[in-house]
């Protein structure tokens, strides 16, 4: 069920909460960095670029590159600047040019 | 509207140290930082790092703990998760926090927004699975994640630190693809005598290299022609070294060829910036106290020129002393007395910089990428596009925006600005200084209409309360 992740997790434990990303459900560590937790769950691509439709994932992890953009509650946000909380509904930004926050 | 004697933007080593020094001198301090916990990138999450991760990250990282704990002071108000999007004369700062915009006014402002990784545009660097080495380190510090089957590529001390940390954790990188050459090492030797003053920095570097060697990680020196391959994600890296082409299958590629000052805030204020040939980057002009051309605004730490975490801390303290003197909380005599040992420490800390900068220069091919390489990640503009604009008479970075939108995506030029400057300078034969940089305009970070609406409501309420 879980996609293969190229990351090793030092910490296996921690309370997990259910979120959905792109319609699929995942149990992520509560309070964890959203971009990091999605990567650990095996998500490689977070979005497609509005220009060419190329796949993109986290690049800088410090809020500078905007490659990890996702949509939460209708607002485009940097996943690396968000924390995991129960019930998050996360979508990929539209590929039709609505991706720029 | 929040008021403070000193507003500090950024809770890394410079910002944290400045806040505490200013508070100790009796100033009220408002510390604004984007992250949920103090530390900046270098000390990310240092206050809550689990015990088993401490050994991997090392003692230098744990030094940040004392700085973060020192923020617990009655004169310091630390607003976490505060994203600054506009800075004006006054100084006035607009920020967003918890879905609401807020305003703050300070008698003085210290910008301590640190560094960014130098953009390293190579073929395939936009693929998922390609990250900066700094990103890999943040994943380790904050989330306990290690990249498996990773290749590190580029040059510089951070590359070695990340590699050594991965080795300690039992997940060594597959190989190190290093772009500096033996000629760079020879050229750096003349800076070595001075660098010996900072022998601890050099000893640490040698220690990291020994760890990498013991772990059996293969190092390629003088690598060139770096390209990353894959359809929808990074699957391999190829490069030339030792006289032949190599291709290595991998799951992640971690790029790094130095860090550069994050000048978004100082640029947005139209402060004068100077080009440093040694660091191949722009930094805001500042005096020996960190004061910029705007006398109310200071810069401390890597945002004013790369010096590392310890230098940043010392610069933060020096700047705070000058602010306290400005606001007549300490005398000139006491300011100078307190600053003297800090300056001595700073001189030692910066002594190794010329050696490091010369020994580990940026990867030449990433400063002048192939025509087909994307240099603006947001708008997917290539190096060839920028050269074509130059051929059509485009002279400056701002003008390129009208040609093809580089620097106009959400990252606002953070990861293409320096590349565009370098490309235009090479094409036009002018210096980087004369070529200049993008004009940076607010909002520095996206702000929603809903967040602004909250600000308007608060303002109206304040006006009603006053009347």
Image (cartoon, coloured by chain):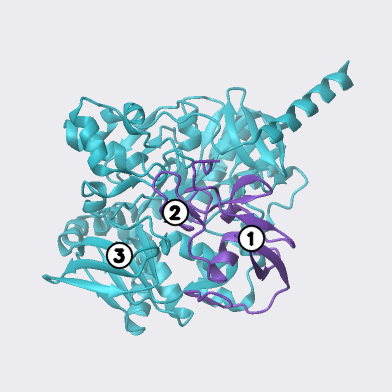
Chain colours: A purple, B cyan
Q: Chain of mark 2?
A: B
Closer-to-camera residue (A16/B74)? A16
Which residue is label 2 attached to? Answer: B308
Quarter of the figure with residue B155: bottom left
Q: Look at 51% across and 71% down and name the residue there.
A: B57
Q: Which callout, 1 or 2, points at the residue further toward the start of the chain? A: 1
Chain letter of disc 3 in the image: B
Q: In the image, what residue occupies the spot 59% across and 68% down?
A: B143
Give the residue at x 57% y 34%.
B322
Secondary structure, mark 3, is: strand
For marks 1 and 2, give the CA distance.
17 Å
Work out whether mark 3 precedes mark 2 in sequence or the reverse, and give the earlier one: 3
Q: Are marks 1 and 3 in contact (CB under 8 Å)?
A: no
- Residue closer to the observer: B137 or B274: B137
On the image, numbered disc 3 is attached to which residue? B229
* Residue B199 shows in the view: no
| Left or right for B150, reference A75 | left
Quadrant housing residue B458 = top right
Q: Secondary structure at mark 2?
A: loop
Question: Residue B309 location in percent, x, y?
Answer: 49, 55
Answer yes or no: is residue B183 visible. Answer: yes
**Image quarter of the C terminus of chain B:** top right
Identify the mark at residue B127; answer none if there is no mark.
none
Percent position of residue A85, x then y: 72, 61
Residue B55 drawn at (x, y percent): 54, 77
């Amino acid at each position: 069920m879980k996609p293969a992740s190229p990351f090793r997790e030092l910490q296996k434990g921690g309370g997990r909460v259910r979120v959905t990303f792109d319609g699929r459900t995942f149990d992520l560590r509560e309070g964890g960095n959203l971009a990091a937790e999605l990567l650990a769950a095996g998500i490689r691509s977070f979005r497609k670029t509005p220009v060419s439709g190329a796949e993109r994932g986290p690049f800088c992890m410090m809020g500078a590159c905007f490659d990890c953009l996702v949509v939460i509650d209708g607002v485009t946000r940097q996943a690396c600047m968000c924390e995991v909380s129960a019930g998050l509904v996360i979508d990929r930004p539209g590929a039709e040019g609505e991706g720029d926050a | 509207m929040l008021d403070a004697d000193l507003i500090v933007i950024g809770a890394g080593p410079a910002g944290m140290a400045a806040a505490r020094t200013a508070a100790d001198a009796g100033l009220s301090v408002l510390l604004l930082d984007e992250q949920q916990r103090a530390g900046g990138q270098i000390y990310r999450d240092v206050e809550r790092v689990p015990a088993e991760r401490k050994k991997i990250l090392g003692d230098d990282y744990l030094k940040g703990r004392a700085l973060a704990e020192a923020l617990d002071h009655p004169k310091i108000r630390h607003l976490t998760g505060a994203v600054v999007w506009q800075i004006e004369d006054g100084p006035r700062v607009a920020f967003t926090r918890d879905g609401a915009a807020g305003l703050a006014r300070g008698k003085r402002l210290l910008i301590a927004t640190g560094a960014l990784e130098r953009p390293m545009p190579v073929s395939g660097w936009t693929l998922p699975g390609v990250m900066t080495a700094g990103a890999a380190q943040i994943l380790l510090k904050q989330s306990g994640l290690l990249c498996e089957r990773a290749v590190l590529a580029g040059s510089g001390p951070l590359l070695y630190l990340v590699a050594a940390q991965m080795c300690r954790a039992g997940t060594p990188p597959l190989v190190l693809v290093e772009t500096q050459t033996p000629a760079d090492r020879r050229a750096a030797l003349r800076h070595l005598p001075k660098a010996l003053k900072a022998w601890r920095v050099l000893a640490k570097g040698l220690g990291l290299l020994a760890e990498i060697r013991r772990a059996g990680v293969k190092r390629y020196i003088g690598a060139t022609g770096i390209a990353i391959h894959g359809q929808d994600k990074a699957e391999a890296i190829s490069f030339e070294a030792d006289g032949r082409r190599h291709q290595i299958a991998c799951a992640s590629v971690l790029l790094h060829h130095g860090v550069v000052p994050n000048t978004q805030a100082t640029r947005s204020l139209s402060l004068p910036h100077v080009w440093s040939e040694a660091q191949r980057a722009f930094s805001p002009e500042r005096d020996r106290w960190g004061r910029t051309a705007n006398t109310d605004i200071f810069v401390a730490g890597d945002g004013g020129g790369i010096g590392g975490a310890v230098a940043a801390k010392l610069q933060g303290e020096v700047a705070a002393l000058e602010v306290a003197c400005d606001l007549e909380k300490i005398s000139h005599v006491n300011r100078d007395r307190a600053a003297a040992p800090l300056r001595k420490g700073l001189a030692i800390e910066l002594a190794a910089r010329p050696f490091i900068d010369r020994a580990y220069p940026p990867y030449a091919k990433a400063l002048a990428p192939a025509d087909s390489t994307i240099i603006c990640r947001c708008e997917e503009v290539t190096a060839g596009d920028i050269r074509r604009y130059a051929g059509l008479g485009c002279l400056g970075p701002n003008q390129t925006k009208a040609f093809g939108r580089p620097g106009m995506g959400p990252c606002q030029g953070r990861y293409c600005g320096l590349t565009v400057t370098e490309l235009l300078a090479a094409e036009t034969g002018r210096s980087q200084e004369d070529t200049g940089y993008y004009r940076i305009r607010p909002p520095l970070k996206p702000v929603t209409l809903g967040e602004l609406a909250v600000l308007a409501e608060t303002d109206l309420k304040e006006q009603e309360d006053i009347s």
